[in-house]
Image (tube, rainbow, N blue to C red):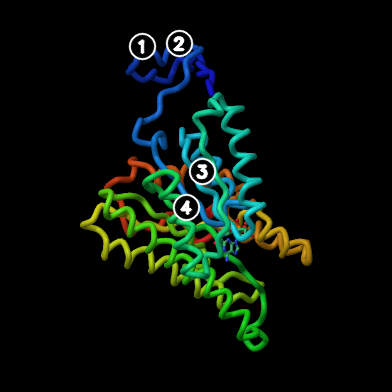
Amino acid sequence: MATTVRTAQAPANVQTPPVLHARSQSTNVAPKTLPTFSMQGKVCLVTGGARGLGFDFCRAFADSGCTSLAVIDLKASEAQQAANELTAYAVDGGGHVEDINFIGIECDVSSELSVQKAYAQIIQKFGRIDSVVASAGIVENYSAFDYPADRMKRLYDINVHGAFYTAREAARHMTTQGGGSIILVASMSANIVNIPQPQTPYNASKAAVKHMAASLAVEWAKTGVRVNSLSPGYMLTKLTRTILENDPDLKKTWESLTPMGRMGEPEDLAGAVVFLASDASKFMTGSDIRVDGGYCII
Ligand SMILES: NC(=O)c1ccc[n+]([C@@H]2O[C@H](COP(=O)([O-])OP(=O)(O)OC[C@H]3O[C@@H](n4cnc5c(N)ncnc54)[C@H](O)[C@@H]3O)[C@@H](O)[C@H]2O)c1
């Protein structure tokens, strides 16, 4: 997608910076970006990719040149529908349909066997795996006294064990091919306690995910497999909309607690996820990137 470079007349008292590239003076040239940010030639996988942040991570990869992508989600039909929508999106952006290989795969990340089967399909189709985002996750709000034990187990099975199975299976393939990048989606809730809604198991699960990323990063550092976490603040997705539908005032509370005064749009994470997934971050492992409108600093 070509973007027009805008040029403005500098005020008399402002020194104009030196011209670095003759191309940057032209008005009809796409601005250059660092080639290391490109996802061209990389095979990507996103769990929970059928909707919400996962879907937008897929879109960010498509925007950055990825043409081989596996969208993983609970239902085959939803995963495939997302893959189809993403294909149409990539074609709209100038891609050729015959070059684009976006596939939907059914997988329950809380089952190790299901995760292994999904990876087997991906390796059979693409032969390798370069960048993996573990985005599948759930949240529920119960006070600690009322939290049903079976639901708490389910939450940890998805958020914590699911992230672990996704990362371990990725690393098994990545170590044999010389490396890759794994991103575990944690949350600002790994660092702070959200108010007013009670969600202790969720917060603890995200703290576990953040430290899991750091711990796996150290275990696999010498193999070329990098593991980092991405910690969003309040983002507008299906997950948060469901909570807000039952409590419209909550949105105002969340916004007032966020220094930037708004909730994040899923595309606000695009730069961070492409940075972590691409070679732009190739000396980075065990780090957490927080994208929360400043929530955690006050
Ligand atoms: N939305 C936010 O404000 C926010 C903030 C911080 C962190 N997060 C984290 O981001 C991630 C994505 O959240 P979201 O807002 O996009 O949620 P969402 O509910 O909109 O989407 C989650 C996706 O994961 C899938 N999924 C759920 N359980 C699964 C399982 N067992 N196996 C495979 N797929 C499964 C769902 O079908 C869905 O497509 C979660 O890990 C969440 O904790 C979200």
Disc 2 residue type? Ser
Residue most extreme to the bottom = 145
* Crowd class of label 4 (few under 14; some 14 to 19; many from 20; radius 10 Å): few
Amino acid residing under circle 4: Gln
Q: Which numbered mark, 2 or 4, is in the foreground of this view?
A: 4
Q: Residues within 10 Å of mark 1 (few under 14, many from 20)?
A: few
Secondary structure category for the residue under label 3: helix
User: Splitting the image into four quadrants, where does ligand 1 fall?
Assistant: bottom right
Neighbourhood count class around disc 2 (C-alpha, 10 Å): few under 14, some 14–19, many 20 upward: some
Left or right, 209 with reference to 104:
left
Question: What's the CA distance linking mark 2 and mark 4?
Answer: 46 Å
Q: Which residue is mark 2?
A: 26
Question: Could you say whether the residue bearing mark 4 is in a helix, strand or loop?
Answer: helix
Q: Which residue is mark 4?
A: 121
Looking at the rendered structure, the secondary structure element under dot 1 is: helix
Q: In this rendered view, identify the residue nearer to me: 193 or 222.
A: 222
Confirm or deny contact between disc 2 and disc 1 (CB under 8 A).
yes
What's the residue at 53%, 28% (across, down)?
A: 98
Residue linked to disc 1: 22
Q: Earlier in the sequence, mark 1 or mark 3?
A: 1
